[in-house]
Image (tube, helix red, strand yellow):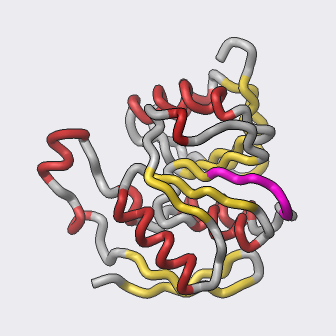
């Protein structure tokens, strides 16, 4: 049973469904194969902060990609601000719920199951790439380090609450702090 929650995004109230507990979604078999945990099922403060930032921007006509979208608040905010949005996550349940929440609120965006270790799925030439609280494990940081330069994004914005792998990850970029634990990344020549 999902719970319903109202959130304010980009000047609108949206009613979203979300799982009541991420812990209840843990699948031991999926974890054994791919160390899969349902991080997507939480409404993380970083996602809320990134959505608030995005919700203040004029994104009309911009191509926006969210990586590790989970519940997709930043993607929903970007779509409300006029962007052409592709929200991605490797969890099929996350993508299905994000699509359902977008439809129930009349928000137009595209969603797709995509893994960071398959960079061809994302294309390139994005105006804005978004990611919130995605550096849970070393493999996440490694895959993201390989993926981001290939996206050829004009701008990358990461909301990062201080996960253990963040410091080493951020060292690979020219970083501008644009809010509390909100960073604009530029791929440096060494990445």
Q: Nearer the viewer, residue 56 or 113?
A: 113
Where is residue 94 drawn, in percent x and y?
41, 63
Q: Nearer the viewer, residue 40 or 84?
A: 84
Quarter-of-image position of residue 46: bottom right
Say which quadrant the C terminus sits in. Answer: top right
Q: Is residue 32 magenta?
A: no
User: Looking at the image, how many numbered discs can be counted on the residues?
Assistant: 0
Q: In the image, which residues are magenta?
A: 60-65
Quarter-of-image position of residue 126: top right
Left-right relation of 36 to 55: left
Quarter-of-image position of residue 19: bottom left
Whether 82 is drawn above or below 139: the answer is below
Where is residue 78 drawn, in percent x and y?
72, 64
Residue visible at 46% across and 60% down? 70
Where is residue 52 drawn, in percent x and y?
70, 67
Left-right relation of 111 to 186: left
Residue visible at 63% across and 67% down? 109
Whether 83 is drawn above or below 167: the answer is below
Where is residue 135 drawn, in percent x and y?
47, 40
Residue visible at 47% across and 30% down? 143
Q: Is residue 63 magenta?
A: yes
Say which quadrant the N terminus sits in. Answer: bottom left
Left-right relation of 6 to 1: right
């Amino acid at each position: 049973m999902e719970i319903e929650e109202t959130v304010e995004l980009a000047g609108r109230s949206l009613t979203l469904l979300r799982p009541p507990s991420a812990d209840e979604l843990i699948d031991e078999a999926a974890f054994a194969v791919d160390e899969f945990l349902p991080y997507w099922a939480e409404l993380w403060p970083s996602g809320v902060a990134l959505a608030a930032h995005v919700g203040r921007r004029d994104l009309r006509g911009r191509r926006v990609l969210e990586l590790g979208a989970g519940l997709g608040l930043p993607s929903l905010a970007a779509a409300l601000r006029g962007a052409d949005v592709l929200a991605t996550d490797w969890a099929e349940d996350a993508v299905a719920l994000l699509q359902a929440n977008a439809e129930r609120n009349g928000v137009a965006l595209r969603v797709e199951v995509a893994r960071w270790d398959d960079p061809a799925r994302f294309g390139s030439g994005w105006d804005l790439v978004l990611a919130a609280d995605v550096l849970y494990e070393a493999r996440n940081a490694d895959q993201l380090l390989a993926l981001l330069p290939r996206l050829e994004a004009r701008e990358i914005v990461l909301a990062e609450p201080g996960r253990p792998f963040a410091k080493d990850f951020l060292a690979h970029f020219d970083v501008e702090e644009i809010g509390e634990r909100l960073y604009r990344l530029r791929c440096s020549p060494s990445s």
